[in-house]
Amino acid sequence: MDINSLIAHYGYAALVIGSLAEGETITLLGGVAANQGLLKFALVVVSVALGGMIGDQVLYLVGRRFGGKILRRFSRHRSKIHYAQKMIQRRPYLFVIGTRFMYGFRVIGPLLIGASHLPPKIFLPLNILGALIWALLFTTLGYLGGEVIAPWLHHLDQHIKHGIWLVLIIGLVVGTRWWLKRRSRQKAQ
């Protein structure tokens, strides 16, 4: 089975799993696969939105249940946590959707939202909307990026062969050098 068959067969499941937490890279790759015709664009968007939504929903529920205990461990960041919780109360719509786009905030954001006791009836629809916007944006970026790297992808196996030869040659040179040094040390003794 070649790589294209694997992507076509397991791609959507891999996208759901890969986008459960920080999934920008997997989403971009899903867009590239859609550009190459290996996956369908709409199903890539749905898959990564589903994974992102499930991941954030689980983190939100963990935050609702254990958020206080978890956040107490970050006593050094108490002022930042307090500020974020104020923002959640003042602008929950913006915060829930925007958390997805804040670098390094994707995991802690839903925990904070859950710990702030934002009602599930507000979080769930915003989570779904945010996941769809995020998935559409990053899949589209990957799709457009696929246009740029498509010529390179068609020659990927040739690049891999060159890379393997390069690694083998470097390994041979390093190994020979190590062997010669070891041999000269043994003769010196």
Image: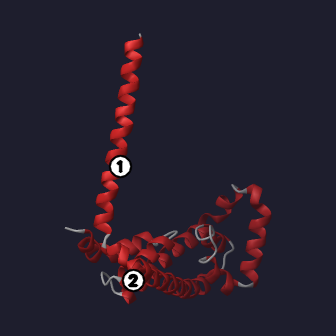
Q: Is 91 on the left-hand or right-hand side of 176? A: right
Residue 86, by quadrant, is: bottom right
Residue type marked 2: Val
Position in image of residue 20 (x %, y %): 47, 71
Q: Nearer the viewer, residue 67 or 8?
A: 8
Residue type marked 1: Val
Residue at the location (36% across, 21% down)? Answer: 183
Position in image of residue 126 (x %, y %): 58, 86
Position in image of residue 105 (x %, y %): 63, 69
Q: Nearer the viewer, mark 1 or mark 2?
A: 1
Q: Which mark is residue 167?
A: 1
Q: Read off the residue under disc 2.
A: 44
Q: Nearer the viewer, residue 14 or 153?
A: 153
On screen, 119 above or below 70? below
Tag 2: Cα neighbours inside 10 Å, few (<14), some, or many (≥20)? many
On screen, 186 above or below 38? above
Residue at the location (44% across, 80% down)? Answer: 148
- Which element carries disc 2, helix, strand or loop? helix
Q: Which mark is residue 59?
A: none
Residue at the location (39% across, 30% down)? Answer: 178
Q: How is the image coloured?
A: secondary structure
Where, quadrant-wise, is the C terminus in this rendering?
A: top left
